Amino acid sequence: MTATMSVSTTPAFLRDPPRFLFFTGKGGVGKTSIACATAVRLAAGGASVLLVSTDPASNVGQVFGVTVGAHVTPIAAVPGLSALDIDPAEAARAYRERIVGPVRGLLPAIEVAAIEEQLSGACTTEIASFNEFTDLLTDAAWTAAYDHIIFDTAPTGHTIRLLQLPGSWTDFLTEGTGDASCLGPLSGLDKQRGIYADAVAALADPARTRLVLVARPAASALAEASRTHDELAGIGLGRQFLVVNGILPTAAVDADPLAAAIHAREERALAALPANLAALKLDRVALHSSNMVGVAALRGLFGDDDGAATAVTGPKDVPVELAGAPLSALIDDIAADGHGLIMLMGKGGVGKTTLAAAIAVALAERGLPVHLTTTDPAAHLSQTLGEEAGAGLPTLKVSRIDPVVEIARYTERVLRTRGAALDDAGRAMLREDLRSPCTEEIAVFQAFSRATREARDTFVVMDTAPTGHTLLLIDATGSYDREVKRQLAPGLNQSTPMMKLQDPAQTKVIIVTLAETTPVLEAVGLQAELQRAGITPWAWIVNNSLAAANPDALLLRERARGEVAEITRVRAVHAARLAIVPLQREVPVGIRALQALAQHNHG
């Protein structure tokens, strides 16, 4: 099956556009640039357009050179265009207070703290944001002035599934029969379920709404987009378009072996699109030499593939200075301890699996005992290690924590314990609770806790660890950590999983990111979440750095210079120690390639 390719300068997703356009995709794929360029294109055609961002890393104001906030702001440089920035953190804070405020002072402080923690995760932020822009979908009077409303960052399938869950969660949670999950955010929504049903119906109606998936031209990013497609299609949002952003133009290869390898890799990924994406209308958007800032840049974003993106000037021999160590130096520090838990964390698409495998292989290569495991539902680990997994490395053990198995095990245990005294209606509600999207995080934590015990005698390298919110939620609802500490006799030293994670002598948390604005902001948010749980990240890794790869092609060198500010900021403000991994000509697959990656010095 072959995707329908857009060849004109009018993208397929912009032909006969409906009133609402939603752009969704992982952080760092260029959703904001695509959304802003779309708004400029529609306004230039005489339409009245409102651009709404619900992205916590939004830089819409920076793109247009104006301050955009919680009030509709006209964009003077683009007649007919206005912008509105919904702050997800502020929306979540206000939403949380509406629920917690009435019980503060009535319930014991420990119970209030548990409720607040249940309302402190990503679920609450997503639902609060959806709550903020529901009026834009359903209130015709409020939005009558606009021909088109464009959303930078659509609600995820996760959020919409939550909003579609039936039942009265308020009573269920108040009575304490619910288990640790992300359903706490729903406790204040019952009165608005009719409005949300209308909003979800608007999302599912292709005559009113167009949903655009944005991805990068990489196999892993396209696999993520494929999963997003299926998740949204599974809840009735199957009419989607696909934009693959940041494709290196053929004319920009410039006799550079690195650029040639990147171009070939991207073309292979596009030729092997997952079947569900290949059935969509596809637009290819070229990589440009700098970030999309200013109206002129946005007007040129949807040009032909080999157009303005190659117009780069400047000397090729200007060196790029980086403030960070190679990955090999980080591994040396890890190896010195002889054992411990190494957790790699970060958003999807930053390369956690590859780096976890490279660290594990490098440690095993030194004869150290290593258990490499993943909690990633995408399970890329076997693909990364290749057919030679473990060959010549007798001290390396590889495993996978299967979320499906762990969910089944966790569900059975909860029904057997908490559900034992419930009537049929109560057990039905509990089963619904256990089908919520966040149950997976809680269930996987059980297996994660088992894996941490090995770290007393060996290295346990974990690809994708529980988030700080997950850990605090379990702690707040199960009280395991606090109860163990309370029962300890003076002088005893019983260690719980939470205590191990908080102890840098036992656990090293490594945050993985890319040298781009959105991934760095997401990593900063992750670090803050971990610190709230009493966990201080040991190091950061900036992965796939063009600056560290020192390319020759002019377009890539220009982009490499743009990375330097992000890397410098991470080193100066956020990271206690920093390693930088260059962008490789080929994706490292197999033991030998991973060994080479671990030994690679940038420069």
Image (cartoon, helix red, strand yellow):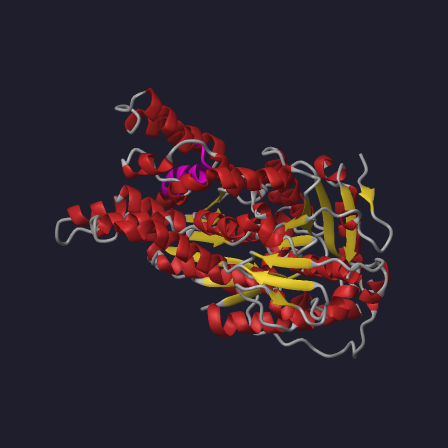
Taking 359 as reference, is 321 above or below it?
below
Taking 84 as reference, is 219 above or below it?
above
In this rendering, would 411 be left or right of 541? left
Q: Is residue 440 inside the magenta stretch? A: yes
Q: Hey, which residue is sitting farthest top in the picture?
A: 424
In this rendering, would 331 be left or right of 410? right
Which residue is at 68% across, 73% downward?
561
Name the quarter where the C terminus is drawn: bottom right
Q: Which residues are drawn in magenta?
A: 435-451
The residue lying toward the viewer, choosing from 211 and 291, is 211
Q: Is residue 465 inside the magenta stretch? A: no
Res 284 visible: yes
Q: Give how far across and how far down residue 290 sits, in percent.
A: 72, 69
Which residue is at 40% across, 27% downward?
431
In this rendering, would 105 be left or right of 500? left
Q: Give how far across and how far down residue 226 sits, in percent.
A: 66, 40
The count of marks equals: 0
Q: Give how far across and how far down residue 321 sits, in percent.
A: 63, 76
Predominant SS of the magenta segment: helix
Res 545 visible: no
The residue lying toward the viewer, choosing from 205 and 58, is 205
Q: Hey, which residue is sitting farthest left in the picture?
A: 490
Name the quarter where the N terminus is drawn: top right
Which residue is at 69% across, 67% downward?
291
Q: Give how far across and how far down residue 300 sits, in percent.
A: 80, 64
In the picture, residue 560 is in which quadrant? Answer: bottom right
In this rendering, would 21 be left or right of 278? left
The residue lying toward the viewer, choosing from 550 and 241, is 241
